[in-house]
Every structure is written in C-alpha cells, then in structure tokens.
Image: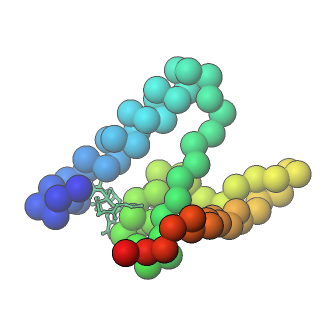
Amino acid sequence: MLAPWRRRGVGRRLLGAVAAEARRRGHCKLTLEVRDDNPGAAALYRGLGFGAGEGDGRAVQYLFMEKRLVSSP
Ligand SMILES: CC(C)(COP(=O)(O)OP(=O)(O)OC[C@H]1O[C@@H](n2cnc3c(N)ncnc32)[C@H](O)[C@@H]1OP(=O)(O)O)[C@@H](O)C(=O)NCCC(=O)NCCS
C-alpha cells in the first residue's frame, strides 16, 4: 500500500473481506507469510488473529522455506 494510505484501516478491511470470502467458499483457514523485519505488517496480522499454526492438536510454528532456481540480479 502506498505510504499515504497506510494506517487508515484499508489492510484490516481487505483481510476481513478475504476471510469472509474464504468462509463463504468453505475454506478452513488462511495462511500468510511475513518477513521478520516487518513488525508493522506482523502487528496487523496478529491483531486479526493470525498466529502460530496448529498441528497434532498443539501450536506449531511453520518455517517458510524457499529454493532459488536462478541467481539474484
Ligand atoms: C502492512 C500494510 C498492508 C498494513 O495495511 P494498513 O492499511 O496500513 O493497515 P490498517 O490501517 O488496516 O491497520 C490495522 C491495524 O494493524 C496494526 N498496524 C498496521 N500497520 C502497523 C504498523 N506499521 N505498526 C504497528 N501496527 C500496525 C495496527 O494495530 C492497526 O490499527 P490502528 O491503526 O488502529 O492502530 C501496509 O502498511 C503496507 O502496505 N505496508 C507496506 C508493504 C508491506 O509491508 N506489505 C505486507 C507484506 S507481508
């Protein structure tokens, strides 16, 4: 989002719309990735209920992994 539009509730509303549509389609959860050097975005997501995942009935933290197939420019 362009800087002048941040902190006006747009991100919260967008994610609310995503969650409503996902529920309507019968999906059971949402997942997202956020860099650990982006505390503002993480605060938004935590405030909307995103957190650790669940596996075997307990909270688990998933690791995001990637493998580069081409070298960075
Ligand atoms: C992260 C981003 C999508 C948030 O969207 P936004 O429209 O600014 O967020 P909202 O106004 O809906 O914020 C809702 C709540 O989230 C939290 N929050 C949002 N941005 C925050 C920040 N920079 N620092 C701390 N808390 C923040 C606050 O609790 C906020 O409520 P408040 O303003 O009443 O205190 C937006 O800042 C952005 O596009 N940033 C640059 C790109 C980026 O980081 N994208 C996310 C990649 S994972």
User: Which residue is depicted at the point 66% across and 33% down?
Assistant: 28
On-image quarter of the N terminus? bottom left
Q: Nearer the viewer, residue 67 or 56?
A: 67
Q: In the depicted view, which residue is nearer to us: 65 or 20? A: 65
Q: Where is residue 29 shown, x and y percent of the image?
A: 63, 39
**In this rendering, position of residue 45 left or right of residue 3:** right
In the image, is 42 to the left or to the right of 68?
Answer: left
Q: Vertical placement of 35 versus 14: above or below?
A: below
- Which is nearer the eye, 8 or 36? 36
Q: Is residue 14 above or below residue 62?
A: above
Q: Position of residue 53 (x, y in %)?
A: 70, 55
Q: Is residue 13 above or below residue 73?
A: above
The residue located at (46%, 29%) in the rendering is 20
Q: Is residue 66 visible?
A: yes
Please provide percent x and percent y for residue 22: 52, 29
Ligand 1 falls in quadrant: bottom left
Residue 46 in sight in this render: no
Furthest residue toward left: 4
Quarter placement of the C terminus: bottom left
Identify which residue is drawn at 11% across, 61% down. 4
